Amino acid sequence: MSKLGDLGARLYRGEVGYDFVGKRFLWYGVSILITITAIVALAVQGLNMGIEFKGGAVFTTPKTTASVAHATEAAEKISGHDAIVQELGSGGMRIQISGLDTAAAADVKGKLATDLKVNAADINADLVGPSWGEQIANKAWTGLGIFMILVVIYLAIAFEWRMAVAALIALIHDLTITVGVYALVGFEVTPGTVIGLLTILGYSLYDTVVVFDGLKEGSKDITKQTRYTFSEIANRSINGTLVRSINTTVVALLPVAALLFIGGGFLGAGMLNDISLSLFVGLAAGAYSSIFIATPLVVDLKEREPAMKALKKRVLAKRAAAAAKGEPVDGDEGAEPGDSSEAVSGGNGRRRR
């Protein structure tokens, strides 16, 4: 068995573990700092909205010897508007000029062909109206709202309302960070970006639901035992799925990274940049939030209950009494009749013989 596989097995059995829940205020602080940075970036720099949302024209040229800087300067001089130029893998260029109407597009196309020394007939021109992008944005907001409502309802039914609230906060956390990164790096926001943002919602929930399922199973009849507090069971649930979460996230990130750094960076494919950056940041943020945000939030909400407070007092009192007698406090010795390691630790506990 590999070292990672052996570590995963030991984490699952509860032989080793990291106190994620105990250090939750550190993770909260990190997340708040990142979120504030994202919000400030949005407020100061704003989003670089694509031509689909602002309206204008997109010219795709055949292979040309002109540089990107030269093409940008020429396009802005000819049109009188801001231009964004991307070099394509074929050697051609994708020139976006915002605010360009239909009447001026034909004239700009001809002058661009002359300046870039290509045939005007070989330049493909697409005109986009801002109303189309507005429709996409409105539908995206509607879809996001419906998705959030359905997620909360499902998690509240399948688990409990505290987990639904925690998952919703984690989703908002992931979306805010992803959008903030777009503002920081200045990547263009296109319909591909919207698709990527909607796609990461499912990925963000995947690891969260896996941990919640282990927590639900591990906390069955929790008040009937005095071995573990709720926070300790939650911590075991995170550790038990930690290696699985890391593996699935890395496997998902590798092809997305190829799209972002190879497809978008080296091949110059604009649409790949748009969708892959949102997927890459969203996947990483989703894996982080499921471990460091969602489950610790459930603990904070759950341990406010009188029953959980009373359980914690009993567990600590029992451990103090055992420590005073010099007895072990981390096993099953002294467990109440009917206690089972399966019931209190989701299968992660070990019974000593």
Image: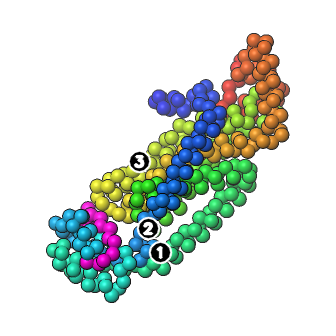
Q: Amino acid at mark 3?
A: Leu
Q: Position of residue 64 (x, y in %)?
A: 18, 68
For disc 2, the marked residue is 49
Residue visible at 26% across and 75% down?
Answer: 77
Three-letter code for the amino acid on which mark 1 is drawn: Gly
Look at the image and give the residue range highlighted in magenta: 78-93
Q: Is the residue 45 above or below the residue 117 in the image?
A: above
Going from N to C along the chain, the mark reached first, 1 or 2, is: 2
Q: Nearer the viewer, residue 299 or 103?
A: 103
Q: Amino acid at mark 2?
A: Met
Q: Earlier in the sequence, mark 3 or mark 1?
A: 1
In x, y percent, where is residue 22? 65, 33
User: Which residue shows up at 69% across the image and 49% down it?
Assistant: 163
Q: Secondary structure at mark 1?
A: helix
In the picture, residue 223 is in which quadrant?
top right
Q: Is residue 66 left or right of residue 229?
A: left
Rendered image coloring scheme: rainbow
Image quadrant where residue 66 sits? bottom left
Q: Nearer the viewer, mark 3 or mark 2?
A: 2
Label count reads: 3
Q: Earlier in the sequence, mark 3 or mark 2?
A: 2
**How far apart in space, not on screen, are marks 3 and 2 (Cα)?**
27 Å
Would you name the residue on which mark 3 appears? 254
Please give the residue where the numbered disc 1 appears in the rendered image: 133
Q: Position of residue 53 (x, y in %)?
A: 45, 73
Q: Is residue 83 magenta?
A: yes
Task: Using the rendered view, name the quadrant where residue 307 is placed.
Answer: top right
Q: Decide: marks 1, 2 in contact (CB < 8 A)?
A: yes
Of residues 334 and 62, the one drawn nearer to the viewer in this rendering: 62
